[in-house]
């Protein structure tokens, strides 16, 4: 009974977060499911400044309990004008120390994945659902994800406005896309996220544990490459 209650709570929490994120885009930036330019986008350099201000806020944020154990908040890094945005779960040990996302072994694998589709880390933007490392690398809780994404990731997505989001692993994919289905069901095809094409795939840390799944991830990122080429040819 308590398992069922926990599961229900998890789904409700995730749906709340998803709805809040969607609401956060505002009626001025989402029209019939498509992102549209707003006056805020007229000056593209403005997004660099806004992201820097937001990052400053995250560095001292105490909005949730994850602030208690962090060394450094890991806001995200990369090209503020990126066409492709990777979203993972949260910082690990190395990321917490360095203040940068995906710098451990999983990060090295992500770099290889990015380079395999003829991009560099400087071309893309990399962020996480939560900006502070959960204790013992546990999965972030729904209230932590809700608090962090509605204060930070929501704005990163809105301001960067990528053409494609690649969700890495269950926490990111279920929170942003569908709390009731697993990555194994959702990966391999594009979904719609507020008018942005969203490709779920396995988290690089999972691929390190299950190298036999790397082929599926490769199929997913090849589709991202093909979609980027198609969108840029239009
Ligand atoms: S995880 Fe996010 S909301 Fe929580 S303290 Fe860190 S920056 Fe703030």
Image: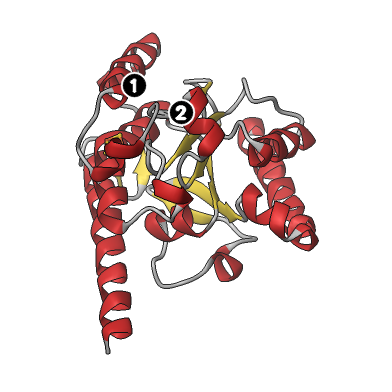
Count of number-bearing discs = 2
Which residue is label 1 attached to? Answer: 55
Residue for point 71% across, 28% down: 119
**Label placed on residue 215:** none
Label 2 neighbour load within 10 Å: few <14, some 14-19, many 20+: many
| Quadrant position of ligand 1 | top left
Nearest the camera: 170 or 137?
137
SS for callout 1: helix
181 left or right of 24?
right
**Residue 162, x across and y down, in percent:** 49, 33
Q: Residue 108 falls in which quadrant of the image?
A: top right
Q: Is residue 138 visible?
A: yes
- Mark 2 in CB contact with mark 1 (< 8 angstroms): yes
The scheme the figure's colours follow is secondary structure
Q: Is residue 36 visible?
A: no
Q: Residue 83 falls in which quadrant of the image?
A: top right
**Residue 204, x across and y down, in percent:** 65, 48
Quarter in which the N terminus is drawn: bottom left
Gap in angstroms between the C-alphas marked 2 and 1: 8 Å
Residue for point 25% across, 71% down: 9
Residue for point 35% across, 20% down: 51
Which residue is label 2 attached to? Answer: 76
Residue for point 30% across, 26% down: 58
Quarter in which the C terminus is drawn: top right
Whether disc 1's CB lies below 8 Å from ligand 1 is answered: no
Mark closest to the chain's N terminus, 2 or 1: 1
Nearest the camera: 137 or 195?
137
SS for callout 2: loop
Label 1 neighbour load within 10 Å: few <14, some 14-19, many 20+: some
């Amino acid at each position: 009974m308590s398992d069922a209650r926990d599961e229900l709570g998890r789904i409700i929490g995730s749906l709340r977060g998803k709805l809040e994120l969607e609401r956060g885009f505002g009626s001025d930036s989402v029209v019939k499911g498509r992102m549209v330019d707003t006056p805020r986008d007229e000056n593209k350099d403005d997004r660099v400044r806004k992201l820097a201000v937001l990052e400053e806020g995250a560095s001292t944020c105490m909005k949730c309990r994850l602030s208690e154990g962090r060394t450094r908040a890991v806001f995200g890094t990369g090209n503020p004008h990126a066409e492709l945005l990777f979203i993972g779960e949260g910082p690990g040990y190395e990321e917490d120390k360095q203040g940068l996302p995906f710098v451990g072994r999983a990060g090295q694998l992500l770099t290889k994945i990015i380079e395999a589709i003829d991009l560099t880390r400087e071309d893309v933007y990399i962020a996480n659902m939560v900006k502070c490392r959960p204790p013992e690398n546990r999965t972030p809780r729904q209230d932590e994800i809700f608090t962090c994404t509605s204060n930070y990731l929501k704005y990163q997505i809105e301001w960067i406005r990528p053409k494609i989001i690649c969700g890495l692993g269950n926490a990111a994919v279920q929170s942003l896309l569908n709390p009731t289905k697993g990555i194994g069901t959702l990966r391999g095809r594009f979904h719609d996220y507020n008018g942005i094409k969203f490709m779920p795939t396995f988290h690089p840390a999972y691929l390190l544990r299950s190298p036999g799944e790397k082929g599926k991830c490769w199929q997913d990122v090849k589709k991202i490459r093909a979609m980027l080429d198609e969108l840029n040819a239009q």
